[in-house]
Every structure is written in C-alpha cells, then in structure tokens.
Image (cartoon, rainbow, N blue to C red):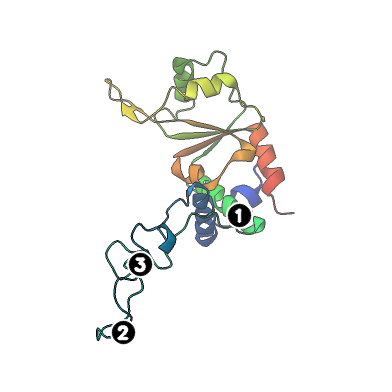
C-alpha cells in the first residue's frame, strides 16, 4: 500500500490558483503575430490633398489618416510576445491544486510500472482492460526521464476519439515525463495514471517543506 503525500495529492483546491496557472500556460501558445499598419506602411500618395485654409473645413494633411477609408490604425496591435509570468510558488500551488482536484474526484491511479513489452495497440488495450480504465481519456505520467518507448509507440496509435464497430470508445492517450507535466493536460484528461517513480518525483518537487 503506497501512502501519498497529502501536501501534493490532498492540498487545498484553490480555483483561483488553478485559473492563474491555466492563463500562464495558455499564454505559451499565443502567437502574438497580429499586426496593423502604421502611417508609413499604408499605400497612398504623400501629397497634401487640400489647401490648408479657405475651405471652411478641418485641415487634412494626408488621405492615409485614420479617419479615411484605407487609412492607418491608431495604436493598433503589433507583433509582440504575449507570454505572461507568475511567481513559481503560485504556479506550483496551482499545479498541486489541479492534482488534488483529480485525486479528490478519484481520477488518479498509481501503478508499479507503465512499461510495455512490445508497443502494440492490443497490448496497451489489454493493460488498460486489466486496470479497468479502458475507454477513458488518460494522461500517463512516467518517473523516468525517457518514458518507455513501447508505451509511447502504443499510445500514439490512439490518435483521436472514435467509436469502434463493437460500440467501445477509444480516446487519445498522452504520455509525459513527470517533470514536464502541466495543468492543462491534467484537467483535460479524465484520468491520471502514474508509476511509483513519478509519485516520488512529484512529492520531491512539490511537497511543502
């Protein structure tokens, strides 16, 4: 019987910290490539279109001004890095909260090993069936820096959710080294499956001293 560290698997489930961690991770994916044209980038003549005085109207220096159709954009978005930052302690607390939420929902399973002998889809399906988790969307978390190659090869055969002819549901499977885990896949997947080595690393990295 493996006793889990309550600081990691039964921590306070802070929704606010989980939300901050999610926004932080989501910012990694933001491209930040949106762009608008400034005055020098808009096509058009540079001549002064009307006389400065005598028209009884506002002066106009260029037809490329923002008030005219086809003009430049004032203070528009420019390409930039959208990545935000949060303190490491806040992110770690958010990750602990996410793991504890899954544990409280009985969606964490610890096994001795995640290694496979061959790496075939049928072998992995048989392993999932023995664990009574077949058909679930699973996030495998391995303690070794290089997860079992056969496990990776077999999990990649579950590319997308589909319903088989026999009515069984197949969901995509994700494999990760424990030090590369993040909040988004933890919450996106229905079940976390960890080996004992991964539990030890998690408790070493995120336990509150």
Q: Nearer the viewer, residue 206 or 27?
A: 27
Q: Quadrant of the C terminus?
A: bottom right
Question: Residues under labels 2 and 1: Cα distance?
Answer: 61 Å
Q: Position of residue 135 (x, y in %)?
A: 39, 29
Is 5 drawn above or below residue 145 in the view shown?
A: below
Give the quadrant of residue 54: bottom left
Give SS at disc 3: loop
1 sits to left or right of 104: right
Report the residue marked by disc 3: 47
Tell whether 63 sits left or right of 146: left
Q: Residues within 10 Å of mark 3 (few under 14, many from 20)?
A: few
Identity of the residue drawn at 69% across and 38% down: 200
Residue found at x 64% / y 43%: 4
45 on left or right of 122: left
Q: Disc 1 designates what residue?
A: 91
Q: Is residue 102 visible?
A: yes
Foreground label between 2 and 1: 2
Mark 3 or 1, closer to the camera: 3
| Secondary structure category for the residue under label 2 | loop
- CB atoms of marks 3 and 1 within 8 Å: no
Residue at figure coordinates x 50%, y 55% from the top left:
23
Looking at the image, which is closer to me, 203 or 188? Answer: 188
Residue at figure coordinates x 43%, y 34% from the top left: 137
Q: Secondary structure at mark 1?
A: helix
Residue 136 falls in image quadrant: top left
């Amino acid at each position: 019987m493996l006793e889990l560290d309550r600081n990691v698997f039964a921590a306070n489930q802070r929704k606010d910290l989980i939300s901050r961690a999610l926004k932080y991770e989501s910012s990694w994916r933001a491209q930040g490539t949106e762009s608008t044209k400034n005055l020098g980038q808009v096509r058009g003549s540079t001549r002064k279109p009307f006389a400065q005085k005598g028209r009884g109207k506002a002066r106009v220096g260029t037809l490329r001004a923002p008030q005219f159709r086809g003009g430049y954009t004032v203070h528009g978005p420019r390409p930039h890095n959208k990545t935000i930052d949060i303190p490491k302690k806040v992110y770690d607390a958010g990750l602990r909260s996410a793991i504890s939420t899954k544990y409280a929902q009985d969606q964490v399973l610890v096994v001795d090993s995640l290694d496979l002998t061959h790496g075939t889809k049928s072998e992995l399906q048989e392993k999932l069936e023995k664990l009574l988790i077949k058909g679930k969307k699973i996030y495998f978390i391995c303690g070794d820096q290089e997860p079992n190659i056969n496990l990776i090869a077999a999990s990649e055969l579950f590319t997308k959710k589909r319903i088989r002819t026999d009515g069984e549901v197949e969901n995509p499977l994700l494999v990760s080294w424990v030090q590369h885990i993040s909040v988004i896949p933890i919450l996106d997947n229905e079940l976390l499956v960890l080996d004992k080595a991964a539990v030890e690393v998690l408790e070493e990295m995120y336990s509150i001293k």
